[in-house]
Image (tube, coloured by chain):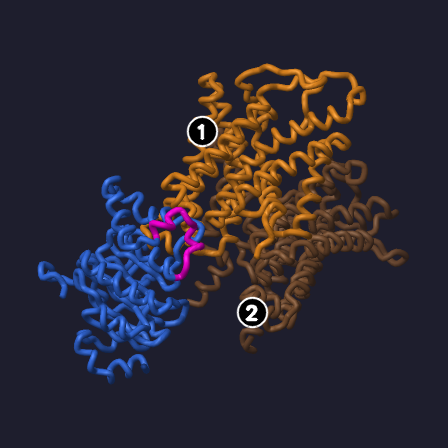
Amino acid sequence: MSTGAHTEPLVRVEDIHTYYGKSHILHGVSLEVGHGEIVGLLGRNGVGKSTTLKAIMGLVHPTRGEVLLESQSVGHLPAHRVARLGIGYVPEDRRIFRLLTVSENLRTGLDGRGVSEARKKELLDMVFDYFPVLAERRSQAGGTLSGGEQQMLAIARAMMLEPKIILLDEPTEGLMPRMVSQIRHIIHVLRREGVAVLLVEQNVPLTLEASERVYFMEKGQVRHQAVASELHADHEVVHKYLGV
Amino acid sequence: MTPRRTRIYWTAFAVILALLIVAPFGLPEFWRRFLTEILIWGLLAMSSDILIGYTGMVSFGHSAFFGLGMYGAAAALLTSRPPSLWLALLYGLIAAAAVAAFVAYFSTRLRDIYFAITTLIFSQIFYVIIFTWTDVTGGENGLAFSRPALAIPGLFSFPFTTLTLYWFVLAVVTASYLLLRRITRSPFGMVLQSIRENEARTRAIGYPVERYKIVAVMFSGLFAGLAGVLYAVQNRFAAPDFVFFVVSGETVIYNIMGGIGTLVGPIVGAAAFLLLREGLSRLFPYLASVVALPGLAEFPYLIPLGVIFIAMVIFMPQGLLGFARRRLNE
Amino acid sequence: MPTTRSFTSIWEYDLLEQILIQTINGIVVGMILALVASGLTLIFGIMDVVNFAHGELFMLGAYVGVVTLAATGNFWLALIVATLVVAALGAAIHVTTLRPLLGRDPLNTILVTFGVSLVLQNYALWQFGPVARKINEPFVGHFNLFYLEYPWYRLMIALLSAAIIGALWLFLKYSTYGVWIRATTQDRVMAQAMGIPVPRLLTLVFAIGSGMAAASGVLFGPLVGVNHAMGLDWVLKAFIVVVVGGMGNLVGSIAAAIFISLTESYASLWVSPSQAIIVSFVVLILTLLLRPTGLFVPTPK
């Protein structure tokens, strides 16, 4: 559950609409994520889950509606300001900087934020603790890492921003099954660190297990919301929105 | 186009043409020549619109086509006795076509920026060749020659006056416009526009895109060369300055200012630019006589003109015509 | 480039000696060309901007150098001041004319920078007049290279250019901004998502490129006269270098600059310098025919 000290949700999306050229992608999406809360976003391919994350991140600007971070409207800010305000983004296909080393990838989140050298070292140590593989490969170019390692790097990189919330877009896509448990572990770590997560996934069991609440999207809108624990038994809802 | 719009279009065309025909009557000598120049530069701008507006290939090579047309005409006018207008046209067009073929062969495989830069470099190559091959081209000083008469050997020969030359140029430019319009509306023209919209898709459908591009460059080069011939005939000299890439740049400016992809737009752009230039170059000396600011008289008109151009690229990329069109539609 | 000749007939001396001399000349001029081209290719590689005004920034750098030199008498101060002033000008140009074009077709950048080059060139003409100015070398002194008295200054230009390019490389590899720049080049969207202020970074890159052009202008000033049209020759050569070297490829541009300069220098043993430039055209044409992505670029996979 979200920490009781906050009355306002961390992130609130109110009725946003987005377009891609003339295509109307999001038809009024509303959702919220509380401080430190893990929230899942499920739905078939193409319903607009990734676009919703991009809208929160400021990579896509909604033509209508609001995106609020701690009651501050951020919908029209450029993405780099949104990142500095505390939203981390881990996109589909990871998109790490392939020609930069692992260390340099992490640096992009560390540098320029006015963080002390001591704190930088703390953050790096923390990340290398959680992801020993990255420590091993710290001088290697990002493109030489395996899929799973790149996924870890993408998440670690976002963690360098010390974000209040991380937007995770299909982290288990293309990963081997044993890496999936790694992802589950990482999400637990994030929860422990008090970082909220908005998790977009196709992997339903993982999502239900890791999240506290789940939204279901269909055709550019959020259609249903449920507490994750209640859904374990309710296969009907899951089947309706995912056809699983 | 709907029948109604067709009628409106041709009516407007007739009215404008009529106005252009009678325009020089009310004008002093200088302005008659000025009008002729506007038409010539307008033709050049129109020719580059084929590439820029219809095929989506921004080219800085037009100064080469124009210049070679000019020098080709010069060659004919210097070697034929009496100087023959038709030979001038022939030589000029052949020279321009040859250059266009050369440029087309190398550049059409490149896209976008690389194409633009390469055409620029090529026009400079021709500039350097012309500039340094003094024996043939007169180098820096260019070539001077006399104006041919409108003649069919054995039948008649009318030397040109400013007025009759103007009408001749008007006839050529109008014919070119109609011809170009026909081309852009033909299936060939449609393919060009499809290349502009989405080259990959056009290729995927099965069109030999490179060949279409080469033909587009050839057409463009021919009409640009024609403009060069007209210029040579009007001004009686050929100089390397016209092959310098800045001329290409100015041509692109006319296109942007007037509105690309419209054929008429570039002519409007050329007229606007040349009028602005004339106006501004008189403005500053005039202002200097009124306000005693040092250096005001020599203030280069190209500075405000350049700023206007930059502003248009940023704020009005559809050009004057596009802007007017939107206003009219509202 | 014409060298100072203090002899009666070149045919008195060995072809080998002439070739060696031209090699040195080629490398010297090549290094300056490399400096100019690096700025251009940096700007293109990182920002997708074709900077037509690069030659004018070179020219204005030379003029600021002239003015500073006249005021202070110190060449090195002139070099630094010119670099900083033109870098600032570059930043201003970027913010006013190029930032509004972010997200639009890169072709617009050619048009806009062409407009900027017109404005800058004519401004220089108006401000400084058509007569060429001179920058004096910071030190005179020759060493004897065969039959020539070869100025030390020329060697110094080559070394200084190399040093500046080297500094740029170090900057890109190790500094914070350097990492940011490399990240932005690879994935502009993700760079923003990592909090990198991309628009400001691009302005910085443009400023750096402009500064490099200005430095080249000052360094080259003593070799030729400084006048408002000096940028035109250089922008043409620089573009050829950038295309031959592979657009956006820093190492390739340097290699191409030296290669083209050397071939031109050798050619000028037999033809006049203004015709020697045809050599670079030929190199360009061959590159376009055989390896359009760049002569010094490994064939793309």
Q: Is residue B51 left or right of residue A228?
A: right
Residue B246 visible in the picture: no
The residue lying at 69 percent from left, 35 percent from top is C264
Q: Colour of chain C?
A: orange
Q: Position of residue B38 (x, y in %)?
A: 62, 51
Q: Is residue A14 left or right of residue B176?
A: left
In the rendered image, the vertical position of residue B218 relative to residue A49, given as above or below: above
Residue B201 tag number: 2
User: How many labels sit on residues?
Assistant: 2
In the rendered image, the vertical position of residue A4 relative to residue B276, given as above or below: below
The residue lying at 25 percent from left, 77 percent from top is A223
Residue A123 tag number: none
Nearer to me, C89 or B322 = C89
- Asked which quadrant contains residue C15, the reply is top right
The residue lying at 49 percent from left, 32 percent from top is C164
Which residue is situated farthest in the top direction here? C141
Q: Is residue B22 left or right of residue C74?
A: right
Element at badge 2? helix
Residue indicated by mark 1: B293
**Which region shows up in magenta?**
A134-147
In the rendered image, the vertical position of residue A70 relative to residue B247, given as above or below: below
- Chain for disc number 1: B
Element at badge 1? loop
Q: Colour of chain A?
A: blue
Report the chain shown in brown: B
- Asked which quadrant contains residue A66, the reply is bottom left
Magenta segment: does it hold A137? yes
Q: Residues within 10 Å of mark 1 (few under 14, many from 20)?
A: few
Q: Earlier in the sequence, mark 1 or mark 2?
A: 2
Tell me the CA gap for discs 1 and 2: 58 Å
Nearer to me, B229 or A64 = A64
